[in-house]
Image (cartoon, rainbow, N blue to C red):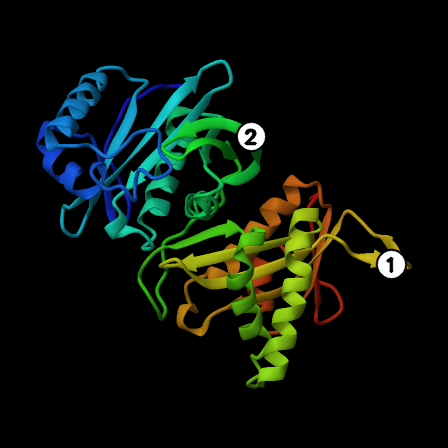
Amino acid sequence: MCETGTVTLTTPRLTLRRFTLDDAPAMYASWTSDPKVTTYLSWSPHPSVQHTRALLAGWIAEYADPTVYRWGIELASSGDLIGSIDARNSDPAIDLKEIGYCLGSRWWGRGYMTEALRSVITYLLDRVGVNRVEAAHDPRNPASGRVMAKAGMRYEGTLRAAHRNSQGLGDSMIWSTLRGELLPSEPPSGGAGSDAPATVRLATPDDLDAVTELRLAFTGRFGTLDAEQRAAVAADTADHLPDRLRGGDLVVALAEVDDRPAAVAWLDLGLRFLGRTVGPIGTLFNVWTEPDHRGRGLSRQVVRACLVEARRRGVRRVDLRATAQAQPMYARLGFRPTVYPAMRLDLTD
C-alpha cells in the first residue's frame, strides 16, 4: 500500500476533509450528542461540547500519521458538517482497511453516507492500493447495511456475539469490497430527470420492494396493469427473487438516483434444458430504465454491472433478446446479433 493520510475528497454533493478544533460545536450539535446516532455504537452521546473538543484534539494530532484516514463530511452546498467517516484497523499483511462512519440523524435517508462511503472506498482501492475494504454493522441496524450495499459492498456473513455496543453484546454483519470488484458509478450524461449521480450496485434480498417496483413498470410498459395483474407480478417476485439471489443463480443490478430505484437488469444463471442446468451460460432480461431517467446511460450501466458479475462467476456466454431500437446499445457492450431479435456476448473473447 501507498499510505497518503487524509486528503480532501469531493463528490457531487459533499466535501470530505480533515477536522479542525473549530469543528467541535458543529460536530457536537450534529451527531456526537445525538442518542439516535449512538444507539448501535460503542460510545455514548457526549455530555458537552468540551468532550467533543477533547476527542477532536486527539484526532487532529493523529493526522501526522500517514496511515490515518479520518474525514469530516461537509455539505458542498452549505458547508454544514454532518458526519464523519474513517478507515482504520489497517492490516498491511493483506492490504486491508476497515471503514466506520457516523451521520447526524437530521440527514438520514438522503444518500449522503452512501456517497461518502463510495468515495472513500474508491480512494482506498485506487490511490492507496488497498486490496480489501470491509465494514460491519449490528443486525439490529439494517439501515447501515443498506448503505454498504448501495455503496457496492458485498455481504459476506455474520459473526455471532462479535462486538459490544451501547445495546450490549451483539452480532456483526460483515461486508467487503476487493480491488477490481467495485461497480462503476457514472455521472449523468444529460437527459431528463434528476442531475444527481447514479449509484449502480447488485441487489440483495432486502431490495425486494425496489426490484418489484421496477419489474411492475417493465411488465406494464405496453399498457397499465390492473390491480389483479399487479398483485400477481408482486407475488411472483416475492416468491422467487429472494431465494434465487441467495442461491446464486440470479443476478439483479440496480441503478439508484437520490436513493430511488431508476433502472434494473436481470441476469439468469439457472438456465435449464430437459431438467438439467445448462452452463456456464447467462440470459439477460428485464432491462428497464424509468422514463424520468432515460438518456443518462443507466440501462448500459446496469447491464455492464451484470456482465462484470458474470465474468467474476466464470460465465462463458450471455444471451438476450432485444428490439431493433435497443440493439445498438448492446452492440456497444460487445453483443453480436444472431437470429433477430437474439444477440450473444462471448465472455471468453
Query: Label 2 sits on what residue type?
Result: Leu
Q: Closer to the camera, 8 or 74?
A: 74
Residue 136 - label: none
Tell me the quadrant of the picture where the C terminus can be found. Answer: top right
Badge 2 local density, few (<14 within 10 Å), some, or many (20+)? some
Residues at discs 2 and 1 in contact (Cβ within 8 Å): no
Q: Is residue 177 above or below residue 90?
A: below
Percent coordinates x, y for residue 17 in the rendering: 21, 34
The residue pinned by badge 1 equals 273
Q: Is residue 282 left or right of residue 296?
A: right
Percent coordinates x, y for residue 236 in the rendering: 67, 68
Q: Closer to the camera, 154 or 42?
A: 42
Give the Cα separation between the discs numbered 2 and 1.
39 Å
Q: Earlier in the sequence, mark 2 or mark 1?
A: 2
Q: Name the residue located 70 percent from the left edge and 47 percent from the top edge.
A: 247
Percent coordinates x, y for residue 209 in the rendering: 52, 63
Q: Is residue 278 above or below residue 166?
A: below
Tell me the quadrant of the picture where the N terminus can be found. Answer: top left
The residue pinned by badge 2 equals 159
Q: Is residue 38 above or below residue 264?
A: above
Q: Is residue 167 left or right of residue 71?
A: right
Query: Label 1 sits on what residue type?
Result: Phe
Q: Name the residue located 56 percent from the left edge and 50 percent from the top edge.
A: 204
